[in-house]
Image (cartoon, grey):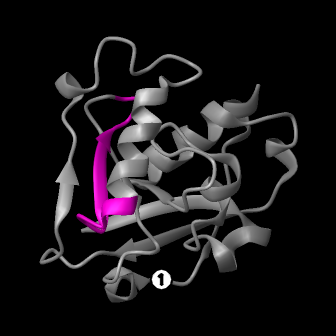
Amino acid sequence: MRVWRIVARKWASTAFSGEGARIAGGRFTPVGVPAVYCTSSIALAALEIVAHADETARSKKWSVLAADVPDSLLTLVVDVKDLGRNWRHVPPPVRLQNLGKLWARSNASLVLSVPSVLVPAERNYILNPLHPDFGRITIHAPEPFSFDERLFR
């Protein structure tokens, strides 16, 4: 399975460390839990950046990174029907962060597959950098990425 991330170029070397989510938290992980949020496509990764962009996004230099997760590794799949009515709310329901915290701490799987809030029919993949199989992921070199200016109007 190939997963994708777009990050500010200055963070490309640490894009798979899990530090960003550990410091800031995410929809499916609270502050303090290292996690690597990835997407199923470059387009979805770009949409995630635009959805969270601030006024500095337009001027940043960006990188796109791919990683290959061996198909033999277990992925825990969360279905949209299991998330409850308000799973797309901002801020996210605490129960979603608790779900991710329990998943990460259990080491039940390397990957947690969740629906994208932006496009629920698409998947986001959360990787646990503390999982014993994390080293089996092949992380490809970052490539420059640029956004079409129309996305930031």
Quarter that holds the C terminus? top right
Q: Position of residue 18 (x, y in %)?
A: 57, 66
Horizontal side of residue 126 vs 23, given as left or right:
left
Q: Position of residue 131 (x, y in %)?
A: 37, 75
Picture quadrant where residue 108 is located:
bottom left
Q: Is residue 109 visible?
A: yes
Q: Residue at left 16%, top 68%?
A: 74
Highlighted magenta segment, given as a residue range = 105-119
For the residue pair 12 and 100, the one nearer the viewer reads as 100
Question: Closest to the observer: 5 or 101?
Answer: 101
Foreground residue among 104 and 47: 104
Tell whether 8 sits left or right of 137.
Answer: right
**Residue 103 image position (x, y, % from top left):** 33, 54
Q: Which residue is at the far left?
A: 72
| Residue 148 location (% of width, % of height) | 67, 43
Q: Quadrant of the N terminus?
A: bottom left
Residue 143: in magenta span: no
Identify which residue, 33 or 53, lies in the foreground. Answer: 33
Mark 1 is surrounded, within 10 Å at the Cα level, by few (under 14), some (14 to 19) or many (20 or more) other residues, namely few
Callout 1 amino acid: His
Is residue 116 a member of the stretch shown in magenta? yes
Which residue, given by chain and number where applicable, does mark 1 sit on? Answer: 140
Name the residue at 59% across, 77% down: 142
At horizontal 55% and vertical 62% (from top left) the residue drawn is 34
Indicate left or right for 123 with 9 as reference. Answer: left
Task: Find residue 84 and report its image quarter.
Answer: top left
Task: Please determine whether, in this image, residue 153 is positioned above or below residue 47.
Answer: above
